[in-house]
Image: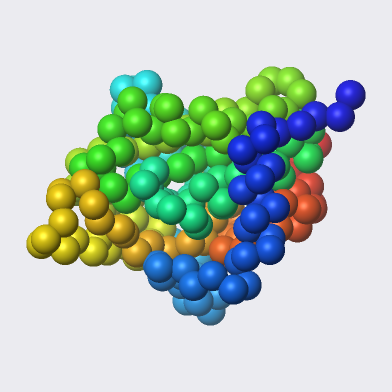
Amino acid sequence: MKRVLPAVISILVVSAVVALGAVRYSGFSQSRMDTEATATSDFDGSFSLTDQYGMHRTDKDFRKKYMLVFFGYTYCPDVCPTTLAIEAEALDKIGPRASHIVPIFISVDPKRDTPAKLKAYLSSFDAKSPSPRVNFIGLTGTDEEIARAAKSYRVYYRAHIDGQLRDSDYSIDHTGDVYLMGPDGKFVAYYSQGILPDELATDLVEKIPG
């Protein structure tokens, strides 16, 4: 039986494919050259944060699995939900192989992204892989913890807060790449903003054992 993602996710993916070329992303994406350079030198990939269930998690908790890591925030209007939807569809496409992957969403907005907020937000993107089911892990923490995690991935982020707006009304520029980390915790690959679900699925199949 053909597996179908929730309607909201499918709509997001279709909209993204049509609009990504025309929409200006209010954020920052590292260049391919910069990312590859750091990946082969001092790319760390470590973190020590709190997941959507209130549990303390580190990168070492996911050894023997591949991690698909993306930094963003739940109030992001376009790129974050689109990227998560693309990840979810790609994982759905690769079937049982998805059980070797842990998709991880690290918030760069700890002020608003509480564990409860992450839990509710990510439930819409959980991939419906055959067995076992693959669920997104959402991570948040203190400002200092998030800063350390971002530094370990060479991720850029910066909040734009207008003094005339309420504290909850602000946007955050951030790196838009997705990072694939190996079972040993080392960098494997990264995927630029705008990759299509089929492209991501094809590359994951090439890099991850069945």
Q: Is residue 71 left or right of residue 206?
A: left
Q: Is residue 74 above or below residue 7?
A: below
Instruction: Describe residue 209's horizontal placement relative to residue 183 as left or right.
Output: right
Nearer-the-camera pick, 53 or 153 = 53
Q: Quadrant of the C terminus?
A: top right
Residue 65 in the image, given as x and y percentages of width and height? 59, 35
Residue 40 image offset from top left, x and y in percent: 52, 68
Look at 50% across and 65% down and name the residue there. 39
Q: Residue furthest front?
A: 164
The mark tally for this picture is 0
Residue 167, above or below 138 = below
Question: What residue is rendered at 66% in x and 23% in y?
Answer: 133
Q: Quadrant of the N terminus?
A: top right
Where is residue 91 drawn, in percent x and y?
70, 39
Who's the residue at 67% across and 35% down the image?
7
Q: In x, y percent, where is residue 113? A: 30, 38
Q: Relative to 84, is 196 on the left or the right?
A: right
Spot the residue most to the right.
1
User: Residue at (69%, 20%) from the top-left corner?
Assistant: 132
Q: Is residue 12 above or below residue 128?
A: below
